[in-house]
Each structure stands twice: as structure tokens, then as C-alpha cells.
Image: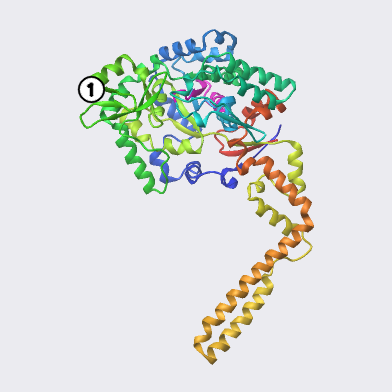
Amino acid sequence: MKATYIDYKDTNSFSKTLLDYLDNAASLAPFAGNRPDIEGFAKQLQAKAGKTDREVLVHVLRRQYGEALQKQSAVATNIEALSSERTFTITTGHQLNIFTGPLYFIFKIASAIRLSRDLKAAFPEYNFVPVYWMATEDHDFAEINHARLHGKKIVWDAPAGGATGRMKTAGMGDTVREYQRILGLSDNSSKLAELVESAYLRHENLADATRYLVNGLFGSHGLVVIDADDASLKQRFSAFIEQDIIGGHSHSAIEQTSNALERAGFSSQVHAREINFFYLNDSFRERIVKLENGRYEVLNQGISFSEDELKAEIQHHPERFSPNVVMRPLYQEVILPNLAYIGGGAEIAYWLQLKSCFQHYGVDFPILVPRNSAMITDDNMSVKVLRLNLTFRSIFKDTEELKKEYVRRHTKHRLTLNDEWMEFNAIFSKLRLRAHKIDPSLGPSTDAVKARLKKAVKNLEKKLLRADKRNHEDALIQIERIKEKLFPGGELQERSENVGPLYVRYGDRLIDELIQHFKPLDFKFTIIY
């Protein structure tokens, strides 16, 4: 496979915040950590050394993988390497989308693997382990219960409640079989069908199923999957839980940073609450709020604590306290020897709101690395693009704009009336002068006639273009089909389509090609074909 690269700004698909971050805008510097470049990583390596309880981390990972670790030598090697003070992680995270959800789930992980390799080449005296942090405590089931293949939406219809990682997979049989049917019949489809069946129908909950599936796709590349919904890991974070719930430190710090970002011209992605933890068990994940009488209540559950009772609960059962979106990053950086977080544009934007919170707790802020974004197509499609005198950069334009440009390039007629309008404009200048000499009050009437004529000329131009489009109907239909294929539903392929059809076409080579062609620190949109 081959790859070409274009600037993110040329795709018209990414936020101002992300583009400014990539351009190293001075206005964002106070909210970011070290820059995502080799020099920045050299600084980060020195800051992060010796601040992680590696013994607990390695013990938890061994337990979570269990016997499966014996079958994945690359993963086992990386987990054992985490015992060393010279090993660091490159982390990405995502929700537990069934069948991996949209393609960017896959792109995030491939970016983490490639960046780990690039850093090893730059700093051979250290080791770098790619990590996928499963968002097992998230409770937004509607965001993860579906996947799209060839435009068809497959939905796991199940009652939602509590953390998605703890959801039982026993009722997924029909959903798995529907996914398998769409994959079709081939060696690659059979392999993927077996992988998803083993993941979802032979594992008890969604966390274990997702670990198995992701390990099946990326395990040979040494990716380590972590489930932070774990009592031992939460114990390492318990002091932060207590301080933040009782002191409200993250709320005030993040609110100040968010206001400063907005004054600098950037919008906030998340809003901190006075208490940024949920109370979690197998049945529910509910917010904790402080009442006027000083007690702490779990919403909708009839559970409350005095301050002393809350401290005791945190000490004895830290696993019952689940960080929300603004505290999960702090938790991640406390328990991992992490150098960088790889995320999408919206994630980078909300991480920029968090630096002051990290500073308050004395935790190193990671380097923020935008994940690789990509479009995957084939030679047939690239040939069609070139035949129409389009480019991989131009196809990001609006469909109607592409059609207009095509007609203007290939028409045998002059479709614009600029020359004629210049003549009309000269005539109206004379008419206005003559009218002014007769009666100065007639000037506005002359201008009104000119405005009506200008509108009529523009309408005539549109009619000329529409008429000539009929002479290029076949080519314009091809443009529509190219856009529909490369931008399903009018959006980037990576934001809707599932990896399934691509895996059926390319097999394991797909993952290899992504890792090979991604360049995480170049900050370019990748087109692979």
C-alpha cells in the first residue's frame, strides 16, 4: 500500500483549537505541556522518572491478562519491561465500542504503537510501551452500542446501567451474528468473525471482551490493554480522591483555566463540577454531591456519608469511586509511567483545560499528541480521482463546489459574465451621472435598478452553469459517487465506518500498513491506498 499526506487545515475537518495547537500558537502555550517533538520528549523523560508504583501496575496487568498472557509474548515482554525505571508508556484511551466502533478507534492505537517505535529509535537507552486505556467505567451505553459497516448500523439492544465495562455480554449473540453476516465469506472475514465471536460470546463482560478483541488485532505489536476499574490501582489514587471530593480543588482550577481559554478565543469542551467523582457498583454509577448540611449524597440511590464516613469509604473501598472526564486523566498519569496521551481533536481540547489541576496535585502533565487521522481507499478509487483531474487534497471540498470546478475546467463555453457585467457597470456609472444632473434624488433609483440587474446576471450565470453541467453528467455522477464512498454520510470515513470491511479486504496487513505509514509527530492527514 502507498500513502500520501496533506495538511490538516486542507481537509476543512478539524477545529481551530487543534489546528492552533499543531501550529504551536503562543495563545495555547500556557495550557499545554512539553511540545510533541523529540526535544519535548527528552524533557518529559527526565520529569517522569521514578514517580510510578511499577510493582502494583505490573501485578495488576498480569492478573488482568491471566493465562492469555502466555500466548502473547510481545505483550508479556512489554508488561515485564514496565518493572524497569527506564520504561515508559505512550497511552491512548477510548470507550468500549462494540466491534471497535468507528475507524478512529483503530487509528488511535496504531498511532500509539508507531510513536512508541519512533521514540525507541530516538532514545534507544529507554523502552516505550503502547497502552490502550479502556474506558470501562464510562456509563454512556448509547455511544458504544453500535457499529456501521457499509453504511448499515448494527445495534446491541440491551438495558444500560452502571459502568459499561461490567455489562454482561450474554445477550450479544444476535448482534454478533449480524456483524458476521455483513462480513461475508473469505479467509479474512472468517478470521475476524471467529475473533469477535470469541471476544463477545466467550467472555463474561464487555471489558474482558474488548481486551480480547483488541489483543487479537494488536497483541503481536506489544500493545498493553489496561482496565483501571481495579481496587489495587484505585488504592494508589485514593489520596487524590479524598482531597478532591472534600476540597473541590479540580473544580476551581479547571474553571479558572477554562475561563482563561475562552478569553484567549477557544471554547471549553468539558465543565468541571464541584465533585468530579461518581459512586460505582455493579448496578449503577451515580454522581456524588455535597448537601447543605455537610453530608455527601449519592444521587438517586438513598446513600449518604458524613465527611468521616466518606473518608473511611474511600480508604476501604476506593474502587467504588469513579473519576469523571476531568479527573480520569489525572488518575491515568498517577498510575502509569506515561509520557504522552494520544487523542482526537476534542480530547486534546479538553486536556488543555486540565493543566492547572495537574499542577495543583504535583502530577506531571503529559505531552499531548493528536492521533493520526486517515482515509483508506484503493487503486481503483485513486485512478477515478486522477481521471477526473481531482487530487486527494481537492476531494475534501464540498461536492457542489467540485462539480462547479469540473465544469469550469472542461466546458467549451465561457460561463461567467464578468466581462459583460463590467460593461453594464460602466453604463450605469454614466446613467447615474446623467440622472444626478437632472435630479440628484434619482441616484438611489438608479442604484436600485443596477442591483436588480446584477442579481439577474448572477441568476443567468447559474443557469448557464446548470445547462452546461448536463453536458458533463457522467463525470459529475462519478464525482458524487467518489464523495459518497470516501465520505460516508458526508463526514470523514474514520468517524463512521467500522474496520470490518477493510480487514476483510486486507487482513492483518491492514494494521501493519497503518503502523508503517502513520507519522505521529509529522501532523499530517494520511491517505492510504
| Residue 132 is one of the magenta-drawn residues | yes
| Residue 482 is one of the magenta-drawn residues | no
User: At 77% across and 54% down in the image, what residue appears?
Assistant: 473
In the image, 499 versus 20, the foreground residue is: 499
- Location of the N terminus (image quadrant): top right
Quarter residue 216 falls in: top right
- Is residue 498 something one can see in this rendering? yes
Q: Which residue type carries mark 1?
A: Ser
Question: Pointer 1: what residue?
Answer: 306
Residue extending furthest toward the bottom: 438
Residue 512 lies left or right of residue 369; in this view the side is: right
Residue 461 lies left or right of residue 38; in this view the side is: right
Is 309 rendered above or below residue 388? Answer: above
- Where residue 433 appears, as percent x and y from the top left, is 56, 86
- Where residue 253 appears, as percent x and y from the top left, is 31, 36
Image mark count: 1
Is 347 rendered above or below residue 306? Answer: below
Question: Could you say whether the residue bearing mark 1 is in a helix, strand or loop?
Answer: loop
The boundaries of the magenta stretch are 112-137
- Where residue 327 appears, as percent x and y from the top left, is 38, 29
In the image, 354 versus 284, the foreground residue is: 284
Residue 156 lies left or right of residue 472; in this view the side is: left
- Location of the C terminus (image quadrant): top right
- Where residue 381 appears, as percent x and y from the top left, is 74, 40
Q: Residues within 10 Å of mark 1 (few under 14, many from 20)?
A: some
